[in-house]
Amino acid sequence: MSESIRPVVRPANTFEFVTVASARARQLLEGCTPKVDGSPKPARRALQEVVSGAVTRQEAEETEA
């Protein structure tokens, strides 16, 4: 019996979810080490990382000019 992946942690909205996953997929394509075991495809692995909570968005720090 195989278990399906169920969302554990999910960003507040779909746009944020897709944005975080696409940024992570780009990092994986550039050679970053995956944080979870899963699909060999970078886009799917990125989605798995976001769903598992291994990757979250990081707030940009505001700089004063």
Image (tube, helix red, strand yellow):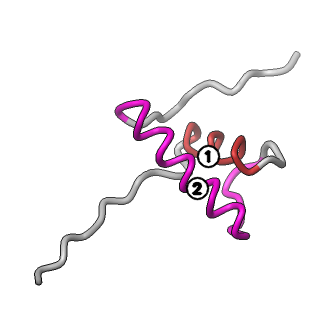
Q: CA distance from mark 2 to mark 1?
A: 8 Å
Mark 2 vs mark 1, foreground winner is 2
Q: Residue at x 73, y 70 (%)?
A: 31
Residue pointed to by mark 1: 49
Instruction: Report the front residue among 14 and 38.
Output: 14
Relative image position of residue 18 (x, y in whole percent): 50, 39
Q: Which mark is residue 27?
A: none
Q: Residues within 10 Å of mark 2 (few under 14, many from 20)?
A: many
The amino acid type found where label 1 is placed reads Glu
Left or right, 4 with respect to 53, comes to right
Q: Is residue 32 magenta?
A: yes
- Comes first in the chain, label 2 or label 1: 2
Above or below residue 56? Residue 17 is above
Q: Which mark is residue 24?
A: 2
Relative image position of residue 53 (x, y in whole percent): 52, 44
Above or below residue 40? Residue 63 is below
Highlighted range, magenta: 12-37
Q: Residue at x 47, y 46 (%)?
A: 19
